[in-house]
Image (cartoon, helix red, strand yellow):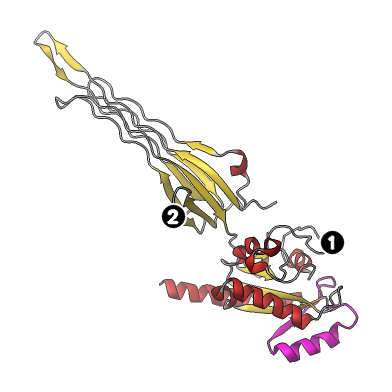
Amino acid sequence: MLIDSAKIYVQAGTGGNGCNSFFKDIFNRKGIPDGGNGGDGGNVVLIGDSNLQTLLDFRYNQHYKAEDAGHGGSNHKQGRRGKDLVVKVPPGTIIRDEANGLLIRDIAKAGDSVIVARGGSGGKGNTKWREASHGAFGEERTLLLELKLVADAGIIGLPNAGKSTLVSKISNSHTKIADYPFTTKSPNLGVVKFHDNAFIIADMPGLIEGAHSGRGLGDKFLKHIERTSVLVHLVDMCPIDGTDPIENYKKIENEIKLYSSVLSKKPKVVVAGKMDLSGAMDALARFKKNIRKKVIPISALNNEGLDSLVIEIYGKVKNAKEKSEENNS
C-alpha cells in the first residue's frame, strides 16, 4: 500500500555545557581559568533515498532526535559534538513546517538533503575569564511530509481501462489485476527496459468525473502525475459498461485540465486498448476520426503493439528530459 503522507516530530541535539574550571599549582594559588567549551548538538537531516518508495515507516516511528553534545572539560577540553541524525525519505517528498505550512524543501531526487532542525550551540567555558554558560537547546518542530511519486511516464484512464495489465506487460511491475473497476488502489511504479536505457512508468488508479475536486480520491492520485514527463492516456475501445470511448477520453482530458493547466500541457501518448475484443477495430476507426491525434492500438493481453508503444513513450520521455536540461542550463 502506498503511504503518501505523514507527520513527524524532530528534535536536534542540545549543546554541551561550558566548563567552569581553574588550574592551580604552587605558583598560582588563585587559579587560572581553563574550562573548555561545550560541543554543538547534532542536527536532524532529511535525505532522499532511491531505495524507498513510500512514507510507511513514518506511520510507526514519528519521533526523531539527534544526539546531545558533550560538556566541556578542564584543561581547555572541548566537548564532543553531537552526531547528526540522518533520516531517509523517498525521492519526491515535500517537507513542510506544520506550524505555518511553509515549504522547507522539496526532496526531488536521491541525494537531495536539508537540515530540518539545527543543534543547539555549546556553552562557553570560563577559559577567558568569563562565566561558564550552559549549552542551548536544539531546534524542535513538527513536519508534514507529502510524497509525490517520481516517474518518467504516468498512465491515466478510467477504472478498468487495462492500465495495470499494460504496466505488468511492459515493465517489471507486478500489480494486482482483475476484471473489475478500482483494482488499483494506489499508484504503482515499474521500470521499462529499452535497449540499454530504461524509464520509470507509474500505473495510476482509475480516474472518474469530479476527480479534480477529490471525488474518488482523485485529487490525491492526480498529484502523483504532476512530476511525470509524459502522460499515457489509455482508452478502452470496448468498455464493458457500453460507454463511448470518445466521451471517456474527453472526460479524463477535462479532469486533467480542471486539476492543472500545466499538467494538461504535458506531452501525451494516446493508446487504444483491448484491441483483441470484437468490434474494437470499428471503434478505433471512429475514435481516430474524432480525436484527430496519433493513436497507438495495443492488446496487452496478446502482447500486440507493445513494442511500438514503448518506442513512442521513450521518445517523448527523452525529448522532455532534453528540454528540461536546456531550460535548467
Towards the viewer: 214 or 233: 214
Q: Amino acid at mark 1?
A: Ala
Q: Residue furthest top?
A: 26
Category of crowding for the residue at label 1, using alpha-carbon neighbours closer than 10 angstroms: few (below 14), some (14–19), many (at least 20)? few
User: Which residue was labeled with disc 2?
Assistant: 102
> Which dot, 2 or 1, sits closer to the camera?
2
Q: Is residue 296 above or below residue 113?
A: below
Q: Is residue 196 above or below residue 57?
A: below
Q: Residue furthest bottom?
A: 289
Q: Quadrant of residue 261?
A: bottom right
Q: Is residue 204 visible?
A: no
Give x and y (percent) for residue 13.
40, 34
Q: Which one is earlier in the sequence, the residue at label 2 or at label 1?
A: 2
Q: Is residue 137 visible?
A: yes
Q: Amino acid at mark 2?
A: Leu
- Taking the image as shown, residue 6 lies to the left or right of residue 33, namely right
User: Which residue was labeled with disc 1?
Assistant: 178
Q: Is residue 76 above or below residue 278?
A: above
Instruction: Identify the element where label 2 is drawn.
Output: loop
Q: CA distance from mark 2 to mark 1?
A: 42 Å
Give x and y (percent) for residue 129.
14, 24
Category of crowding for the residue at label 2, using alpha-carbon neighbours closer than 10 angstroms: few (below 14), some (14–19), many (at least 20)? few
Magenta residue span = 275-304
- Assign the C terminus to one quadrant of the image: bottom left
